[in-house]
Image: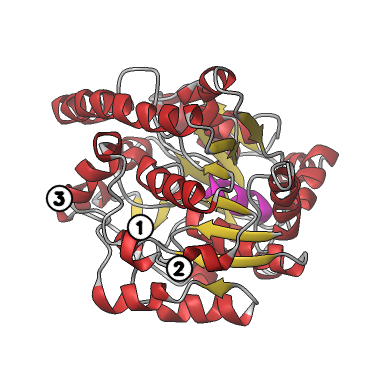
Amino acid sequence: MNILAIGNVFNPSGVSTHIINVLKSLVKLGDNVILYVPYFLVDNKVEILEDLERAGVNIYPTVYDAIEKYSSKIRTFSYFIESHTVSLRWNNIGEDKELLKGIEEVKPDIIYDMHEDSITLRLSYYIGKKVNKPVIKLLHDEPFRYSFGRGYRKFLGLKGLAYDMIMSIFYKFDKKAYEIAMKDGILKGIAAVSESSIYYSKLDEIAKNYGTRIRVYKIGNAFDKEKVYKFRKLKNKESYAVFFARLVPQKGLTELPKIAERLSAKIIVFGKLFSESDKKYLKSKNIDYRGFRPIEEVYETVSKAKVLIYPSHQDGYSLVVLDTLALGTSIVAYNIPAIKFVYGDLKPVKLVNEYDYISLSREANRVLQMDENEYIKEHEEEKVKEFLDLHSDWMNVAKETREFLKEFVNK
């Protein structure tokens, strides 16, 4: 297949990790892969593009031109507004129109838009229509919700309520963008790394009206077996907890001190703070904040810990939980759909009701006091071994991806 992929490979996140590894694996499977990064997502980290090229992924030439001319708009207020209101300016793809001149020469069989955002959907729709080829969309998170906001009011108070009100309006525009793309017969398929994004958006019900296929990948993500397993440790665990993620309220940062004061051991915390005002959540005497550290240091510390504290409210598919499980460490988390749908049947992953930080603390203490034999037995259950084996190779993710994409080629 000749695959034109739309994706941001520059953002230090699980999404970029997925995109990079799947594209490299698709090349190994024999596909010709061309990556286009929209002008509003470019960054000057050309070494990432060079690494992809060494792996056989072709970078659309004007991406390098865009890097010299533009800077990423992510996390700017203007981008926040623009990215959720594209249905109001559906035919205006901005600077990408000039950068994509000659896209017909690529002769793609399919356009694989590897983000759930409606702003990249507008772009992939434009390309799909121009080259008369199907567009397939990949969801990491939900593109919109059928419920009120994202539940931020429950942990951010009035500020969160204001955000939820705004998002409820924006979600109507995002939903409209998907409906336009499906109604026009351009968006032919929607894949998801987990059931969570479909659950929140009810996209499966909407897609039925337009004949758009939905596929939830069985293996939505993977971990780096070579890098992770050299740190894996089940015996002689040390009596401390660990937390690593983006240090933002939606990942449970505001609950962290409340959990820490109820724990029988300290919590070692890794991650980048995005707001100076959030430092106050790391002041507890039971919290040892290490900052943003090399992944090898994080893995070594996590592998020695007895439990990961993970009070996240927002996830599409948690690579933090996946890496931690592969490192041989148990997890206590809220039972949000992204965690429940993927990890709910695995004994080392303990789930409590969302927002119930008291129960989360209690369950974490139980794990901290768990007998070593019982602890090891949970991790060595056949179901856990099978899960880790399936998720230990990005090639498994790529094969499932390829299988879905092929359904739309030469149809």
Left/right placement of residue 281 relative to residue 147 reads left
**Given the image, on which type of amino acid does mark 3 rest?**
Ser
* Cα–Cα span, label 2 and label 3: 47 Å
Residue 322 sits inside the magenta stretch: yes
Q: Quadrant of the C terminus?
A: top right
Residue that carries the numbered disc 2 in the rendered image: 102
Left/right placement of residue 275 relative to residue 232 reads left
> Does the magenta stretch mainly form a helix, a strand or a loop?
helix
* Cα–Cα span, label 1 and label 2: 54 Å
**Given the image, on which type of amino acid does mark 1 rest?**
Asp
The crowding category of the residue bearing disc 2, from other C-alpha atoms within 10 Å (few below 14, some 14 to 19, many at least 20), is: few
Q: Which residue is more in the foreground, 358 or 321?
A: 321
Residue 370 sits inside the magenta stretch: no
Q: Is residue 336 visible?
A: no
Q: Which residue is more in the foreground, 84 or 132?
A: 132
Where residue 253 sits: x, y (%)?
32, 43
Q: Which residue is more in the foreground, 226 or 126?
A: 126
For residue 207, which quarter of the picture? top right
Residue that carries the numbered disc 1 in the rendered image: 288
Question: In this rendering, which labeled residue sits more in front, label 1 or label 2?
Answer: 2
Instruction: Tell me what residue is drawn at x 55 percent, y 48 percent.
Output: 132
Q: Helix, strand, or loop for circle 2?
A: loop
Q: Which residues are magenta?
A: 318-326
For residue 383, which quarter of the picture? top right
Question: In this rendering, which labeled residue sits more in front, label 1 or label 3?
Answer: 3
Residue that carries the numbered disc 3 in the rendered image: 277
